[in-house]
Amino acid sequence: MERVPALDEPLKKSLGPATAKVMAEALDLHTVGDLLHHYPRRYAERGELTTLADLPLDEHVTVVAQVADARVHTFNGSKGRGQRLEVTITDGSGRLQLVFFGKGVHKPHHDLLPGTRAMFAGKVSLFNRRLQLAHPSYELLRGDSEEAVDVWAGALIPIYPATTKLESWKIAKAVDAVLPSAVDAVDPLPGALREGRGLAELPDALRLIHRPRTKADIATARERLKWDEAFVLQVALARRRHADTQLPAVARRPAPDGILDAFDAKLPFTLTEGQQKVSKEIFDDLATEHPMHRLLQGEVGSGKTMVALRAMLAVVDSGGQAAMLAPTEVLAQQHHRSVTEMMGELAEGGMLGGAERATKVVLLTGSMGTAARRQALLDLVTGEAGLVIGTHALIEDKVRFHDLGLVVVDEQHRFGVEQRDALRGKGKQPPHLLVMTATPIPRTVAMTVFGDLETSVLDQLPAGRSPIASHVVPAADKPHFLARAWERVREEVGKGHQAYVVCPRIGDEEDQKKKTRHSAADEAEKRPPLAVLEVAEKLGAGPLAGLRIAVLHGRMHPDDKDDVMRRFAAGELDVLVATTVIEVGVNVPNATAMVIMDADRFGVSQLHQLRGRVGRGSAPGLCLLVSEMPEATPARQRLGAVAATLDGFELSRIDLEQRREGDVLGQAQSGVRSSLRVLTVIDDEEVIAAAREEATALVLGDPDLTAHPGLRTALDALLDKDREEYLEKG
């Protein structure tokens, strides 16, 4: 019988079934290898005590500290029926209260004498405005036996990501049991690469990260393990890119004097330098005989739609069709309207008054009437329609194309990979793919999350776009600031402009059903988020009385939504009170002011997206971020950052630092454990860029990794079934 490789050994064999069960359920660790790759979160030093001063509320923590004081209090009469042990621990930076009740008092009362040092683990809670741990687990750090002196004197104590059922020191003991197996770890890095970069061998790195003697040991281990993560991931992405270059596609070159030339000739402005450069990159890709896979990222309002439309027209010129996939009906209708307006008579193919080189532009959404839908489907299958714009209704089985040459996906982060894949499958051969996003992505994230796509960046704003002034309005501390905000809205309307008011919630019965318990961290969090319907009513009766106000949200009938948007765009409404349905693609140049209520409930990138809806014309824009959060909170600092800069790339960086990365292979939502443990896409830009270069070169020379069995094994471990599919479709 074949021997199971040491790192694939199930944990129950080495740790026993009970511990193995808890490790599997609580931490998703199943094999010896899983446990060896469960690295310490940080290290406590014998001589340097953990800071109690900044413990996070409601989190499970492990601290190393000394007992300062221990007292037993008796309650429920003097017979001692109820006892409470209160222990105060200190680490020089702060103090923390530990509480034990009832029968659980005796052992800690005996163990935790003043002066005793120990590791304590538990969930931090707030009681009488003081931080405390109720019934924490603890492990005494005794220095009497020779072995203990050896372990603790000067040693760095690893603190592992732990759970209530499994304290850090229990994980440490389990790691001790399996650490000898590290010598059998298969090294994924080619020897030449490892030696060339002076990296430690894998067994040494695993030993050093778990049981370092010095801080230099930790640095050596982390540097090596970061390379493993970056390199294996980049090899996976490089193989995807390589496989794509092997696929056949129809080269699409615009015909001279075709619809693209006619479109360019009637443009009332010249393209920015950035638009011209990016268009050239796209046209070069379209002219090749393997499918383009390109990510087009650009600031809100940088003219991405114009670049995408010119690419779509180039494909129509070459006899093919182009589809644009939008995440919402509102956005699909908006794109359809703006594309037909930009094209004018060129969008009236087959109609009276249509230009000679015109094509038909059809809209396809789920809520269309049967007759309109049937006509749209017919136009697609006959090739009458060169351009189609739609929601995921485009992906349905019934939809057939005459010759699909290009798929443009708008706002990538709203589309599942499966949907992209389904649409790509509708071409006779794989169509070219252009993914657009208005959420700026730092370069390293683009290299990891979208590593199978080539990236183009539009970072200039077209001429005529106006600056947007942003301010935080502290509604709780300074209510008169909020009153002034509504005066500003009235002033803008007085000048003939329009305004948005954005709220996090709709406020209908559906919302009430969804109400969730809020954390008791503070009062502002306790009340439900402000709702569109309530805010619109209050504004109409109060500070904005007399103005023409309407509401817009995702649960309205599509026709009603479209009607409201049309009236707002036509200037028949002064103020639109809406949810984030206006976040992407809504273009009303006359709207100059936006007030975002409960702005702290939105993410940084989302606030930046929303803000991009104003200042789209010649008049300057104003964005007011209203929040009741106290000044010192992280939420308020986040709003301050948004108000301080209009640079979306800078904000996306802040956003990522605050949220920390999920699983960059796209599995963040499904709760799959992150494939990144020591690598951070923000701080390790150089490692990621270097790993991408090395991976690309290696895959070019050996696409099947025949000469690198260790790397293949690591890839198989990284690309479990789900992730493999993700990359396949990505």
Image (cartoon, grey):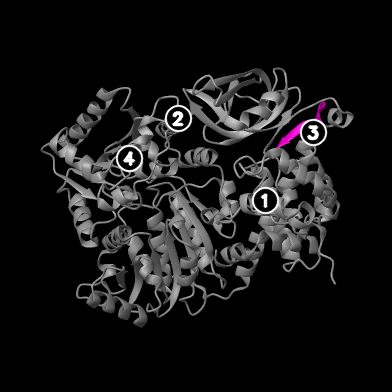
* CA separation in Å, label 4 and label 1: 37 Å
- Find residue 208 and report its horizontal and vertical position in percent: 80, 40
Q: Which mark is residue 528?
A: 4
**Residue at 66%, 51% in the rendered image:** 22
Residue 336 x %, y %:
30, 63
Q: What's the magenta region? A: 152-159
| Whole-percent x, y for residue 198 in the image | 82, 44
Q: Which mark is residue 637?
A: 2
Q: Give residue 591's position: percent from left, percent from top.
A: 25, 43
- For residue 259, say whether it is visible: no
Sequence-wise, the earlier of marks 4 and 1 is: 1
- State the residue lying farthest toward the front: 79
**Element class at badge 1:** helix
Residue 705: quarter of image: bottom right
Mark positioned earlier in the residue sequence (2 or 1): 1
> On the picture, is 38 further left or further right than 489?
right
Q: Quadrant of the C terminus?
A: bottom right
Q: Amino acid at mark 4?
A: Pro
- Residue 576 visible to the viewer: yes
Asked which secondary structure carries label 3, the reply is helix
Q: Secondary structure at mark 4?
A: loop
- Residue at image coords 70%, 49%: 690
What separation in Å lies between label 3 and label 1 (alpha carbons)? 30 Å
The 10 Å Cα crowd at callout 3, few under 14, some 14 to 19, many 20 or more, is few
The answer for how far apart the CA atoms under marks 3 and 2 are is 34 Å
